[in-house]
């Protein structure tokens, strides 16, 4: 970055009205990284002729080899409009569904998103997913319809056919905004051609156009079609350079940090907005309390770990001591910097409203809140899909075990959508991710690069245990016979469970803002008196103290919560995580001397009582299902239907247009392994599928017993269920 640009950035950092924090998001191969290259070239950071080829934002070796974006990448650049400089903090995000966690974390850092769609393919499943991710974080979208040159040259569309295609894509995008945005934003965030919130173009050919730009320059759509069809793209990108049209759209229609924080803070921070720190964030007070959230942690060979954070209030300086709120510890900032793709430019200080790289926070993790003092933490960053594919990882050389554990700890810090667990009963190390590619790219390949030889199992499906009925009251006595607990379990009401599933209420909120949690649960249909008695939430289950006047119960409540958490991590049916269940302590009798009611007496007793109650409440298994879209030539639809049905799938919808069929189906995750190869085989290599959603449904009773037996066998648990 030229020295004068760095000086300009230093000045602009203190002027929020001239800052835009934006993400570029789309379905895989719709042109995000090529578009980012164009924007970076337009800012003078790479040669214009390399835009679209350099893949400036795909600087990881794996990304270049695979030809896909795996990690969200940041860059800060300057763009000039009518003589005024603007600071654009840009994040290029992955398009493959397996790396969607990076998109979710990026959306916390930005205020606006440029949604890309391919003019030929249109709105695809991952387009829907990224719009949904943006709107969940109250990030305002604009639309860029890319690869328009393909409509002109390859498909030779008439202007009327192109207009028809654009209208349909814009209608689908607005339909998704209406579906996923909150009421107050749904209509006003619709994208429209006439106001310039939609642009069209070709990132690969480096040109774009929008209605405001055509009005300002006199350029016509006919002229664009003529130049493109004649292959005069160089001439076209001089008349309508992509970077200028897109960044003008960003500056005119996406909010600056001060505007965005007025409505975003209440969504992403559940503390008291009337408090001094809440007001500092809403007003973007750079002299106020430092409040920031870490959205990415990545290793640097020279600096250790670099944490990327969005600053919502205050100023961060090198040498500052900051609180890591989640871990209740303080660490010293060694460096603060801005990003230039793979490089970082060091600064003395960075103020609120910016995206910053921080060195020195060696215990930080993605999603951690940092502040200058103890504050209520930001909402945890929850991806819309949960990890459903798991592999067992085993060191070939037992001496590498410590290295493996250290690597997994760091990998899950960097990417919280990866989950690693060591099964204490079996000694098995399990890694869960969003898909096979996710585990391969973030776990298997890096281990190999580090020379740690491991054996991985075939993919394992993670089920959930639940109940279908109210249990009787179950009484359990402690080993020393001095303590007694009475417990019952019952299913959570569907609307209440939805609040937990969407992350609106979690354990942090129950502990720090019970009043707010109670109101949300009551609004969803829970009895207020029952909601007030909630003491913990774990894995979307609730622990409720339904007892009256039990002496010493508060003194052992931490141990009861520990027992509740251990059972909801590993249920009685198959040692799988539990879901959708209320555990109610209805009575207890405790010894007056705390020596006789320690962990060894309380934890196993409460855990056993919960497990027995579950086994008396029609225990059931929930299996993960993927809702997918299969695109295939019309003549192979019959083969695709057979493939779905042979894998216990259900066809939800089929549409056929211009010889191509889109089949929407629901298939159990257990039956999707090897699906890609089978689909290629059944469609002559022309079919492909994309993930739309993941859901959990009750497994048919006739299959449950065999699945439970296989899981217990794999885990080395006694069979039958004890």
Image (cartoon, helix red, strand yellow):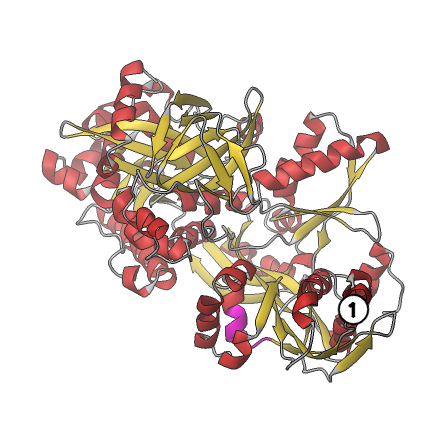
Q: Residue furthest front?
A: 593
Quarter of the image where one finds residue 225: top left
Q: Residue at the location (53% across, 28% down)?
A: 360
Relative to 321, say whether 373 is above or below.
below
Q: Which residues are magenta?
A: 492-498
Q: Residue at the location (70% across, 66% down)?
A: 556
- Residue 680: image location, x then y, percent: 61, 47
User: Which is nearer the eye, 156 or 73?
Assistant: 73
User: Which is nearer the eye, 44 or 569?
Assistant: 569
- Residue 655: image location, x then y, percent: 45, 61
Whether residue 477 sits left or right of residue 62 in the image: it is right
Q: Which image quarter holds the C terminus? A: bottom right
Relative to 509, say whether 139 is above or below.
above
Considering the numbered disc 1 on the image, is that residue within a helix, a strand or a loop? loop
Q: Main secondary structure of the magenta part?
A: helix
* Residue carrying label 1: 593
Residue 437 visible (yes or no): no
Whether residue 676 sits left or right of residue 2 in the image: it is right
Relative to 81, say whether 591 is above or below.
below
Residue 542 visible (yes or no): yes
The verdict on residue 571 being magenta is no
Q: Which image quarter holds the N terminus? A: top left
Q: Residue at the location (58% across, 47% down)?
A: 417
Q: How many numbered callouts?
A: 1
The verdict on residue 495 being magenta is yes
- Residue 677: image location, x then y, percent: 65, 46
Q: Residue at the location (53% across, 58% down)?
A: 508
Q: Residue furthest bottom?
A: 472
User: Which is nearer the eye, 153 or 341?
Assistant: 341
User: Which is nearer the eye, 189 or 554?
Assistant: 554
Relative to 100, say whether 545 is above or below.
below
């Amino acid at each position: 970055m030229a020295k004068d640009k760095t000086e300009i950035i230093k000045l602009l950092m203190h002027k929020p009205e001239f800052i835009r924090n934006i993400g570029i998001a789309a379905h895989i191969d719709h042109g995000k990284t090529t578009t980012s290259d164009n924007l970076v070239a337009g800012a003078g950071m790479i040669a214009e002729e390399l835009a679209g080829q350099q893949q400036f934002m795909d600087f990881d070796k794996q990304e270049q080899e695979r030809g896909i974006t795996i990690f969200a990448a940041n860059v800060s650049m300057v763009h000039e409009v009518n003589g005024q400089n603007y600071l654009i903090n840009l994040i290029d995000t992955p398009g493959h569904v397996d790396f969607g966690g990076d998109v979710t974390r990026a959306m916390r850092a930005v205020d606006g998103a440029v949604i890309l769609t391919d003019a030929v393919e249109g709105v695809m499943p991952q387009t829907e997913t990224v719009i949904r991710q943006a709107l969940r974080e109250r990030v305002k979208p604009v639309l860029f319809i890319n690869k328009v040159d393909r409509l002109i040259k390859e498909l030779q569309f008439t202007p009327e056919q192109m207009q028809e295609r654009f209208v349909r894509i814009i209608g689908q995008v607005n339909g998704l905004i209406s579906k996923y945005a909150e009421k107050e934003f749904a209509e006003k965030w619709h994208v429209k051609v006439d106001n310039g919130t939609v642009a069209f173009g070709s990132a690969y050919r480096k040109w774009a156009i929008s209605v405001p730009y055509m009005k300002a320059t006199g350029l016509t759509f006919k002229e664009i079609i003529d130049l493109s069809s004649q292959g005069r793209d160089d001439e076209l990108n001089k008349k309508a350079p992509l970077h200028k049209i897109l960044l003008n759209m960003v500056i005119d229609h996406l909010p600056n940090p001060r505007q965005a924080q007025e409505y975003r803070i209440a969504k992403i921070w559940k503390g008291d907005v009337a408090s001094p720190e809440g007001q500092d964030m809403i007003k973007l007070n750079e002299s106020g309390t430092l409040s920031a959230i870490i959205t990415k942690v990545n290793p640097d060979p020279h600096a250790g770990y670099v944490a990327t954070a969005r600053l919502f209030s205050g100023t961060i300086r090198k040498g500052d001591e900051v609180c890591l709120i989640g871990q209740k510890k303080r660490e010293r900032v060694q460096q603060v910097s801005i990003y230039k793709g793979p490089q970082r430019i060091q600064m003395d200080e960075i103020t609120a409203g910016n995206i910053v790289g921080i060195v020195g926070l060696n215990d930080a993790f993605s999603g951690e809140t940092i502040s200058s003092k103890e504050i209520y933490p930001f909402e945890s960053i929850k991806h819309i899909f949960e990890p459903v594919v798991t592999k067992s990882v085993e060191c070939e050389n037992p001496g590498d075990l410590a290295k493996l554990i250290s690597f997994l700890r760091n990998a899950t810090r960097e990417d919280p959508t990866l989950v690693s667990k060591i099964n204490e009963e079996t000694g098995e190390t399990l890694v869960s991710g969003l898909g096979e590619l996710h585990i391969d790219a973030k776990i298997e390949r890096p281990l190999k690069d580090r020379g740690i030889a491991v054996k991985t199992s075939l993919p394992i499906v993670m089920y959930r245990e639940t109940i279908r009925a109210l249990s009787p009251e179950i009484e359990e006595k402690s080993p020393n016979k001095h303590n007694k607990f009475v417990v019952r379990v019952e299913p959570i009401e569907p609307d209440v469970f939805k609040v937990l599933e969407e992350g609106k209420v979690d354990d942090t909120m129950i502990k720090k803002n019970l009043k707010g949690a109670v109101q949300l649960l009551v609004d969803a249909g829970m009895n207020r008196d029952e909601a007030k008695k909630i003491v913990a939430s774990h894995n979307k289950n609730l622990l409720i103290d339904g007892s009256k006047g039990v002496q010493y119960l508060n003194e052992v409540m931490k141990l009861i919560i520990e027992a509740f958490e251990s059972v909801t991590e590993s249920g009685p049916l198959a040692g799988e995580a539990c879901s959708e269940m209320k555990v109610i302590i209805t009575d207890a009798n405790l010894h007056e001397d705390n020596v006789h009611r320690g962990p060894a007496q309380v934890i196993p007793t409460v855990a056993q009582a919960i497990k027995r109650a579950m086994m008396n409440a029609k225990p059931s298994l929930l299996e993960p299902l993927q809702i997918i879209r299969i695109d295939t030539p019309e003549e192979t639809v019959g083969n695709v239907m057979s493939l779905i049905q042979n894998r216990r799938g259900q066809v939800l919808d089929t549409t056929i247009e211009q010889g191509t069929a889109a089949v929407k189906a629901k298939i159990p995750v257990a039956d999707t392994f090897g699906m890609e190869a089978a689909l290629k085989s059944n469609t002559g290599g022309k079919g492909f599928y994309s993930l739309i959603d993941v859901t959990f449904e009750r497994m048919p009773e006739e299959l449950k017993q065999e699945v439970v037996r296989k899981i217990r066998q794999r885990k080395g648990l006694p069979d039958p269920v004890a």
